[in-house]
Amino acid sequence: MKRGSKERISYSGIYIDAEIRKQELEAAQKLLEKSLSKAPEGNIRIIRVNGSAQYYLRMKPNDKNGTYLSKSNTKQIKMYLQKSYDLKAKKLVDEELKNLTRCLGKNVELPHKLEQLYSNYPEEARIHICPVSKSYEEMEREWMARPYRRLDVNNVNAGYETNRGELVRSKSELNIANMLDRYHIAYKYECPVVLNNGIVVHPDFTILNRDTGEEIYWEHRGMMDDSGYASKAVFKFKEYMQSGIILGKNLIITEETALNPLGTDEIKVIIKSLL
């Protein structure tokens, strides 16, 4: 039985996202607790009269009505409204944090165990198994092992050799390749992609998404001060969009001109932010 991608469980970072959310909630909880510790005694009551809000200060729980606060008393109204919001927000934060903590517990390792299950079998046994889930490392190994025919750059006069020993066309592409390699991000250089219109293109870099196992394309447009080059780049960008390759989703574009080259710090920011 051959199991297609639809029958497989996609690589998921749900527990990583949950842990990040938990940390954010814990930070919000501390902020709210600090704010409430400085809040004044009493609570504010809000009613609407003829479409306008009116505020009443209740100093005791059994005080149903409270003392009217004039709208000119902005500072006091602001303090009690903030307290009102913080109390309600903390209740919701506490509830979500409790649920997340319970959900994470020992469960955080379960997706990893499922993904590693296939990898735990001997290599000669794996060829007989159709897994429902694979680890990122296994997906990466298989993805990198797939052969492809890249564009020929051996005739390029000014080729640059990457840390992986491959030849690229420009200094900026060299920096991108080496930075991807430095952060252990799987990539292929000028791997062919067939667009919906049948045209074959060769994105500068094809990258394996760590979260989804899908491909991300990185195009570096290095001569944007050349009008002919820029026109072709825009046309190619439109062809990408028509094939579902969308900027910010599965497409990264960097640009430079002779006077404004792409910096390594910019490459690092893109990798850390998007990859």
Image (cartoon, helix red, strand yellow):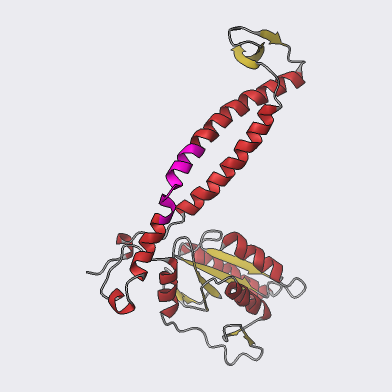
Residue 108 rendering spot, x and y as whole percentages: 44, 52
Residue at the extreme front of the image, as rendered: 106
Residue 271 shown left or right of residue 206 in the figure: right
Q: Quadrant of residue 2?
A: bottom left
Residue 146 shown left or right of residue 35 in the figure: left
Placement of 26 over or under 163, stated as above or below = above
Front position in the image: 220 or 274: 274
Q: Quadrant of residue 156?
A: bottom right
Count of picture labels: 0
Residue 92 rendering spot, x and y as whole percentages: 53, 32
Residue 8 shown left or right of residue 98 in the figure: left
Residue 1 rendering spot, x and y as whole percentages: 22, 69
- Magenta range is 97-109
Task: State the predominant SS element of the stretch in magenta.
Answer: helix
Residue 6 rendering spot, x and y as whole percentages: 32, 60
Front position in the image: 198 or 96: 96
Placement of 51 over or under 214, stated as above or below = above
Residue at left offset 39%, top offset 57%? 111
